[in-house]
Image: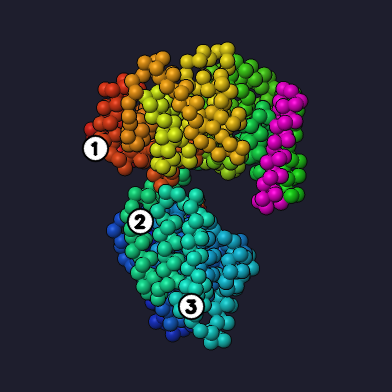
Amino acid sequence: MTLQSGPVNALGSGLRQGILAAVEAAEADPAVKAIVLIGGGRMFSAGADITEFGKPQSGISLPDLLNRIEASTKPVVAAIHGNALGGGLETALACHYRVAVPSAKVGLPEVKLGILPGAGGTQRLPRVVGPRKALEVIVGGSPIGAKAAAGMGLIDELAPEDGLRAHAVAFAERVVAEGRPLTKIRDRDDKIAEGRDDPSLFAAFREENARKTRGFEAPEACIACVEAACRLPFDEGIAFERAQFQALVSGTQSAAQRYVFFAERQAAKIPDVPDDTPARPIAKVGVIGAGTMGGGISMNFLNAGIPVTIVETRREALDRGLKTIRTNYENTAKKGRLKPEDVETRMGLLSDTLELDALADCDLIIEAVFEDMGIKKEIFSKLDAIAKPGAILASNTSYLDIDAIAAMTSRPADVIGMHFFSPANVMRLLEVVRGEKTAKDVIATAMQIGRKVGKIPVLVGVCHGFVGNRMLAERQREANRLILEGVTPWDVDRVIYEFGLPMGPFTMSDLAGLDIGWSRETNKSESVRDLLCEQDRRGQKTGAGFYDYDARRKATPSPVTEEIIAKVAARQGVKRKDATDQEILERCLYPMVNEGAKILEEGKAIRASDIDIVWINGYGWPVYRGGPMFWADTIGLPKVLERLRAYQAEYGDAFKPSALLERLAAEGKGFKDL
Ligand code: TC6
């Protein structure tokens, strides 16, 4: 029986009906002795059809289908290649035996979609691998290789890479010839005894994972289901799983997480740059600047096996940069996440130079120097003379005008922005900035190479701060105003953290360093930041910023900061007032949504979902809230509009609603309808 449906064999209603009919026909046919279930195309199955969730069900449900397969009177063998994920693996678990090629991957990633393996996965998996491993697989959501799965007893036999079908058929023939029993996972209880005898393992697991699962509903439901598997008879466990699944799948978190799954894939699609646009080959990359950004950017390419030449103006800066890259790799190796020999392989791909001329043979050159337009212009006019024809010239600027930079060259079509986020070797977002004259194949190449080095590229247009930092500036302005009114920085940070972001604006400033772009000469002690910097409270690195830090960088609220704030507020005559947590949240986040709407109006982002992908991957916006634009839709745009108008009346035009927001609210629509 070969599964054949779309690119990933998603188990939509048509495929489910087909499997049911095939099982029934096979059972009824005396010539059939056993069934081998195999995936046609690239994989076994990527699981349930995600687009069907939230819609009325048509035909047999997946759990019922799987019970039917398990109850088959003839042995069913799953033959796995590519992926068996979610409902795909659950299908395999309902079969009596499983064989797989070594390169296959199996897993239950439902938790990443805000749901749980609701087709028996939470009840069958612990019965095969025990509760501890089941928790790791189900709550972690990451796939595992077939060899490891075989080691856990999840796969009965590994098949040769190019002979899966024949091997699985021979396996089934052996099962029949030897009269082996129709082993059903539901009947096993040896492995779950551990969870019954030692229920404390669940509390321990919850505690270990509390930080990672903060704010998410699905992980707790997954744990509760595995707990139920150990405690309850199979059918009762299935009923418990069903109820938990239904609650999650109809909730906002799952809607948000499913939206993000498709939004991420959508971001790769650019209407006027078709998928088949030929990309320029990138065999060698040049990076200008060996600072934190330049070093991090270089690592991305080295990790992907692409040689990098890094340029600096001074030897000491170059040596420092190289040393940081090496130390980063060595630390990863110490944690066991990189083989020691790979440290040398990667460093071997890196060459360093003090001469810009050395970049003459690079296919892609990324400038990552200080944010100074004068310096950038000078570099690009030099690059124009040095770079080979067809080379892509990129700037990592986080807010400057790419068109002005491109204008310094005779080849503005080859110039583009590639804005990485710090730490650049870790953060997944890449804003690809399209200039007025950027060529389509240059855009296609930047998006493609971004994906190749593990980033999530999002195409944005030229404007101050592009998408991410432009919206961030809105939040920062309001956060600054709130503290002058008397809300403490710690309260602002707490509200933002509790909302689900990794940290609030003042913790973030302390981490980045308050003196970025600050100098004693040019900044005249007018803002809270100026005064903090003057007192050498420049953030975590100096042991104090908005907060005080101990030797282990633990933050405590600082009375010094509160005094400084009070002084600035008095000097500026700011009226002190109280604000509720709700007001803090609205004043920090609604202007961001409003700015997002302006970005859309101006065509600086292609779609609202692209803005959400920027915020999730560049700033840690909680994925279970689906990004700022999706979140605004869940609140309802009329409500957001009403609050913006109220704040506009009190604080002025910083809160003036955008025309797009006004229009959508009036039409009863959301950003999702654009
Ligand atoms: C579940 O099983 C729950 C069970 C309990 C039920 C009671 N459904 O990612 P790609 C589309 S929940 C619908 O580019 P790759 C995808 O949008 C599910 N569509 O390919 C894209 O469409 P486009 C648990 C799906 O080779 C196209 O297929 N499973 C589904 O880079 C190609 O996808 C998961 O969470 C789906 N399940 O990666 C696994 N999957 O061309 C989700 C994909 O129109 N899938 N599409 O843009 C994946 O992680 C990856 O697709 C992959 C293949 C690793 C399988």
Q: Residues within 10 Å of mark 2 (few under 14, many from 20)?
A: many
- Between residue 128 and residue 490, name the one nearer to us: 490
Q: Residues within 10 Å of mark 1 (few under 14, many from 20)?
A: few
Residue at numbered disc 3: 188
- Left or right? Give the position of 411 relative to 636: right
Are circles 1 and 3 on residues that touch, CB within 8 Å? Answer: no
Q: Position of residue 40 (x, y in %)?
A: 50, 63
Q: Secondary structure at mark 1?
A: loop
Quarter holding the C terminus?
A: top left
Q: CA distance from mark 1 to mark 3?
A: 53 Å
Work out whether 471 lies above or below 518.
below
At label 2, which amino acid type do we have? Val
At x 29%, y 58%, the residue is: 56
- Between residue 293 and residue 71, name the one nearer to us: 293
- Between residue 554 and residue 273, name the one nearer to us: 554
Residue at numbered disc 1: 668
Sequence order check, earlier mark of 2 and 3: 3
At x 72%, y 22%, the residue is: 313
Sequence order check, earlier mark of 1 and 2: 2
- Left or right? Give the position of 260 relative to 55: right
Sequence order check, earlier mark of 1 and 3: 3
In reply to whether residue 329 is colored magenta, the answer given is: yes
Q: Position of residue 608 (x, y in %)?
A: 39, 36
The span shown in magenta is 310-339
